[in-house]
Image: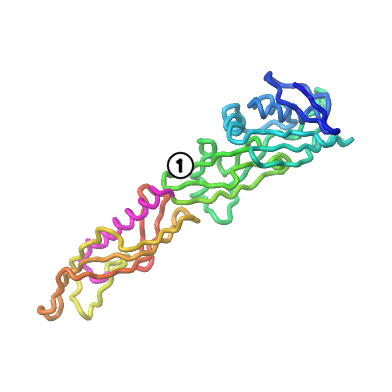
Amino acid sequence: MAIAVVAGIAVFTTRDSGGPVAATTPDGAVKAYFDALRRGDADAALALSLTEPADKTFLTNEVLKKQIDNAPISNVQILRVEDDGRVRVTATFGERAFDETVTVKQDTASGQWKLERTWAVIDIGEQGAADKALIDTVTLFGQKMPSPGRALVFPGWIEFGNTNSNLESLVSPPLVPLGALWRDEYSIYPEFRLTDDGRKAVEKAVLAALSDCAKSRSLQPKDCPQRVSAAVAIDGTAQWTAPSELESVSVPETVQAANGLSVVGRAVFLLTVDTPDPRDRRFNEPLEVFFQAKVDIASDPPTVTFPWG
């Protein structure tokens, strides 16, 4: 590894060879850690940790390569080394620069200097806005998040996805900061949105629910939005023709609860019904219906209820 000193600041270039590196100084440990990350050597990075990770699902060369490919590490500089082993370092992940002080300690067994921890604990389980059903749909680097929404990762770029094709999990910026290494946990709050296919699935499910409502012979079908007064028609004689499309519909982009997506809209039924005076019998009369639907997108296909039906 080449080391250049510019104006009293140590600037380190990438080490090409792999494998664990013995660090005989605090700054040497920090240098070796960033070197391991930049070359995608997860084992070498973990070997520089005083703490053993409980789970290595996302602490692999494959995942680390994805992180580095999407947010390369550059501009690593050691600015200062304190007498107690703390090392001030700056580094850039992708386009985001960090200036942090890393705590480095000497391993009593080997005498080598190591970071207290070389991986971060991220947590998406403690959500104020999202419910557990949504948390359970999140994937990390293409794999399902461990329960209860906590995972161990190296700092840098992260990739969230979703097991539900109707949803997408978004985080901005998609980056675990360097400072997350010395926090007990780093909380991430993904935003859940409907995909284009998800929106279509919701509208299709609403239409299907309205079609079920059209099977009733009642003037005011239970749990359905269409209503006709019994004062002007004979109950039990209604023949509903379901709408083939929605006249208007408002579907929220952001999802707060998997089983409680609120959708409002307007549809037109055709109604044939007997009246007290046969001369007033209604035949295929359009009836404009305004509805509010509660959609459960956790189910496949989504299910719909009309709370005020």
Q: Secondary structure at mark 1?
A: loop
In-image side of 22 versus 274 (left or right): right
Farthest residue in the front direction? 7
Q: Quadrant of the C terminus?
A: bottom left
Q: Position of residue 229 (x, y in %)?
A: 25, 77
Compared to residue 18, the image places residue 127 above or below, namely below
Q: Amino acid at mark 1?
A: Thr
Q: Residue at x 44, y 51 (%)?
A: 194
Farthest residue in the right direction? 83
Q: Which residues are magenta?
A: 195-220
In-image side of 127 versus 38 (left or right): left
Compared to residue 102, the image places residue 21 above or below, namely above
Principal secondary structure, stretch drawn in magenta: helix
Farthest residue in the left direction? 279
Disc 1 target residue: 163
Q: Position of residue 232 (x, y in %)?
A: 20, 79
